Amino acid sequence: MHVNIVKAPCIFLSCSFSSRTMVKKVANRRSHLKQLGFWLIMIIELLLLLPISSQKIPARKILNDDNINNSSHFAVQLKTSHPESDSVVVDNGLVEVTIENPSGYLLGIKYQGIDNVLEERNEHSDRGYWDLVWYNYTTYDKMETEYFDIITQTDDQVELSFSRTWNPDNPNLVPLNIDKRFIVRRGVPGVYMYAILERQENFPSTEMFQIRIAFKLLEKKFNYMALSDKRQRIMPSLVDRNTDHSQVLAFKEAVLLTNPINPQFRGEVDDKYQYSRENKDNTLHGWIADSDNENPAVGFWIITPSTEFRTGGPHKQELTAHAGPIALSMFHSMHYAGKDMDVYYEQGEPWKKVLGPVFIYLNSVSVEDLDVHKPLWDDAKRQLSQETESWPYDFTASDDYPSAEGRGTVRGRLLVQDRYMENELMQAQSAFVGLAPPGEAGSWQKNAKGYQFWTQTDENGCFEINHVRPGEYNLFAWVHGFIGDYKSDLDISIEPGNNIDLGTLIYEPPRNGPTLWEIGIPDRTAAEFFIPEPYPELMNPLCNDPADRYRQYGLWDRYSDIYRHGDLVFTVGVSNYSRHWFFAHVLRRGGDPTTWQIKFNLDDVRFNDPSCPQPHFSTQLIGSDNAIARHGIHGLYRLYSIMAPANLFNMGENTIFLTQANNTGLFNGIMYDYIRLEGPMD
């Protein structure tokens, strides 16, 4: 992207760069007012870029309510535990969990008359499994294990371990020691899953790009997906995505359903990236199988009571599910962040991390109703609340997962000082405050090796971060309405039982002078800008809610329709950013670069030459996250301050030229967070 500007007062430009983008420098023109010494500061936020009665009977209460009480006397049984058996079965009277021995593949879950909620037509390794992408981003390791151990076996709980030790003679395996754990508890309708991954000092260097658990559910039963209160729907089937029933759009993940088996889906778009969520919100999602003549309606839910083990912080976006039906528990990926989230481990660099536990919860309602989905969803939310209150769990057997007594607490208060907004200190209301591995300000966005613990401040800026694992941390924050990243100067060491009060912390956001004008809100998303109506023939009803309208397919292409006679021109004081600033600075249809203009009047300065061969500022090549194509509203946050002395300005009308010049890919583009022009300091 070219930013063609003339040296002017301080500009803060918060932008979001998606895919491979380049911001080139601004063309310059001499000013008649060299003595003013204005600065141009550009802040760029990289939003790097689901027997039947004829009478309508209300659904009865969740069956688990009765069954849990009735099964409280039912001891957890390990039915098959011989080391040489092909499978291990754990039964608590509510669920029967079958795991292949010694591979650790989840073969089946029997629940409420359904012999297996997983797709039995699939291979053993393709039902419920961990996998890891490593080496060159094309090598998959399904984390198949070699050893089986019984960790805990009581009437109340069974915990099983499936493990492998890295073998240097097998180059196809990621250099990790892997220990996959399964826990089934008395009276609990589900299974807890976690993994302990370890690299020892003698392991060779390697890269790891993605870690997840995937569940492929019974296709003939599960057809309703639920991600949140508003994001729920009946889903097309995997068959509907075949070439006989659909048309592939601009990328393989997005298809137009042209001849679906269920005609209600005709003319809709299905794309797994439309079902993404940010880590902070991605705590509950799942699928529902409607009732039939033989079975009640059943819900399959992935509950994630803590995000401490996920990478990239609270705003990192991850996949949740897609047609199949497939449910995902994502721990790490490069989605919406690009190569900045690539994790490289040097030889001699030891590493160990516990991923999870996550809870696979099953529930059901006893009779068919017009809406069985709501009671199942509401019950799953109740279970999420219960799991969250129980975190950290006290029933895991691994020493690598500390209980509440083995963790610490950090509290404090965050205030903001910006004398150009208020003379007094301001409370950092609803600010995100977190502990993450030591690094520079904002480094938590790209951190993929350690643990992170986040909370939000109250109306007075007070915060408390509980249940922090022992380790070394820095405290980071960002505040809605203010640019930049905060980092405390303190190095924080957490030991078991620590209760640390940091007192009052003060954040001074980047500032070079008073605000002359601004575009947008510094909130690290482009959601407040103009998001166009989608093409009517390319809709997904799951994205119709105003809060999710940016998830509709093909919005990047709408720019060429709306600005067919010329690129975007924004006039300060006249234009409205929610109507006149397109949410993503993209290429034209066909790949031609686009140049946006910001026009403004100053009494003293001018700023204007788009033809200058040497731009004033360039970000160079950054990004490669595909956030625009993946229906994101942000990627990574990048802050750029561009300083421009006054000799580039003239009196009268001024123009800043922003050019997205990199046209190496169809979806190259930028999402701006916020732009501010500052005057000289008083």
Image (cartoon, rainbow, N blue to C red):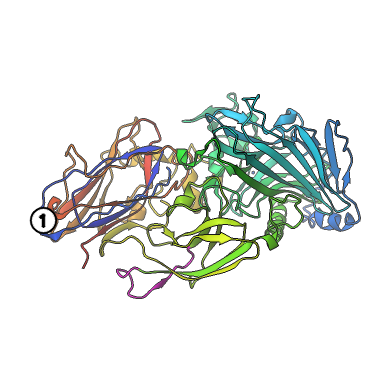
Local SS, label 1: helix
Magenta stretch in the rendered image: 418-431
Q: Is residue 680 left or right of residue 254?
A: left
Residue 147 or residue 11, whichever sits in front: 147
Residue 557 appearing in the image: no
What residue is rendered at 64% in x and 41% in y? 198
What residue would you read off at disc 1?
34
Vertical side of 525 occupied by 590: above or below:
above
Residue 157 in picture, x, y percent from top left: 83, 51
Q: Is residue 436 left or right of residue 579?
A: right
**Amino acid type indicated by mark 1:** Lys
Prevailing SS of the magenta stretch: loop
Residue 546 or residue 583, whichever sits in front: 583
Residue 520 in picture, x, y percent from top left: 35, 56
Does the magenta run of residues contain 364? no
The quarter in which the N terminus is drawn is: top left
What residue is rendered at 56% in x and 54% in y? 452
The quarter in which the C terminus is drawn is: bottom left
Q: Is residue 611 left or right of residue 377?
A: left
